[in-house]
Amino acid sequence: MKFIDHVKIKVKAGDGGHGCIAFHREKFMPKGGPSGGDGGHGGDIILKSNKQLSTLQDISFNRFYKAERGQHGRGKNMHGRNGKSITIQVPLGTIAIDVESNQILCELTKENQSKVIVNGGNGGFGNARFKTQKNTAPRTANDGQVGEERIVDLELKIMADVGLVGFPNVGKSTLLSTISAAKPKIADYPFTTLIPNLGIVKYGDFNSFVMADIPGLIKGASSGKGLGIQFLRHIERTKLLLILLDGTSFDIESDLKILENELKNHEVDLSNKPKLIFVSKNDILEDNKIIKLLQKRNIISFSAITGNNIDIVIKKIVENLEKFNFSKKTTAKKI
């Protein structure tokens, strides 16, 4: 299944049915009263979250949704049937934004959460509604209201507890595959990760947290360079950021400053999130200058290949998550 996290759709709610002008007619009652029924309401367009979904791919195949209009009213006080609504299933973490006003219509972060994004038109009144003592045979009825329509941007932000951030090829995917059951693509070249990956990390007997690995960032990612800008939104909801630095880098401090600036430039709140800093590839870490720097700043290094300090990495993550009232029992669907 292809990972798609942004789709623009057009939605049109159903129009309301027209009210009917009719008069009661039967034998021996040639001049019966008004009997025109009301029109039915138009159908709505509804978004509903579904935890079984992990991408907006299905929606990308159909960019226009139109709900059914309400039936017109009929004689003998018969009201028109309401139009059928359309429910669009979306993954947890989906945000709907009105393109014209840039207003956020809804943010679906819980299972089976739903929101009407365009309302169907009300049905018109039949002439039976207009009968008065002075006007016993009204020849007036209402047309149904026009249903709402708009163009909507759907954006998916992955629901995860920990977000992995780093340059390409620093070992994020290797770490995720080591401490969880996730199987991201791993290779020794930049931009191996082209889509976000989720992994459930278990600790203790029954507890777990969800970690998201996004494509590597480069300098200028927040302004559109590389692949990271497409996926920075996926770590906006995380409780904790894990910044991963490459132990073989020539200038780890410069790498850290660049990453922190990219987070800040993307969104100030993102840069203010709680963070942990780790250094990967300590199995090939030979530069004594870097080793002393890590010791001075109390930064933990690890090796996902040998497993060195992996238990400490998990312990530090859990300790920090629990500071923010983290719910320990977590489940999520792996992409």
Image: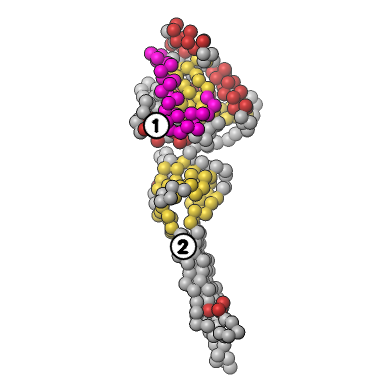
Is residue 123 a member of the stretch shown in magenta?
no
Q: Name the spot of residue 274 as percent of width and height, x first.
A: 54, 26
**Which residue bears the numbered disc 2?**
147
Query: Where does the magenta region start and end?
Result: 248-275
Q: Is the magenta stretch mostly helix, strand or loop?
A: helix
Q: Nearer the viewer, residue 31 or 172?
A: 31
* Residue at the spot 48% in from the left edge and 38% down from the top edge: 157
Q: Distance between the residues labelled 1 and 2?
A: 39 Å
Q: Tell me if 134 is positioned left or right of 63 in this view.
A: right
Label 1's element?
A: helix
Where does label 1 land, which residue?
222
Q: Which comes sooner in the sequence, label 1 or label 2?
A: 2
Question: Which class describes the residues within 10 Å of circle 1: few (<14), some (14-19), or many (20+)?
Answer: many
Q: Is residue 256 magenta?
A: yes
Determine the residue located farthest toward the left in the rendered image: 225
In the displayed structure, 10 sits above or below 164; it is: below
Residue 40, position in %: x, y? 52, 69
- Tag 1–tag 2 contact (CB < 8 Å): no
Q: What residue type is labelled 2?
A: Gly
Q: Can residue 126 be seen in this view?
A: yes
Label 2: element kind? loop
Choose between 147 and 71: the one closer to the eye.
Answer: 147
Residue 79, by quadrant, is: bottom right
In the depicted structure, whether residue 298 falls above or below residue 19: above
Q: Where is residue 35 in the image (x, y as percent from the top left)?
A: 55, 81
Question: Height in image: 276 above or below 153?
Answer: above
Relative height, residue 214 to residue 67 (above, below): above
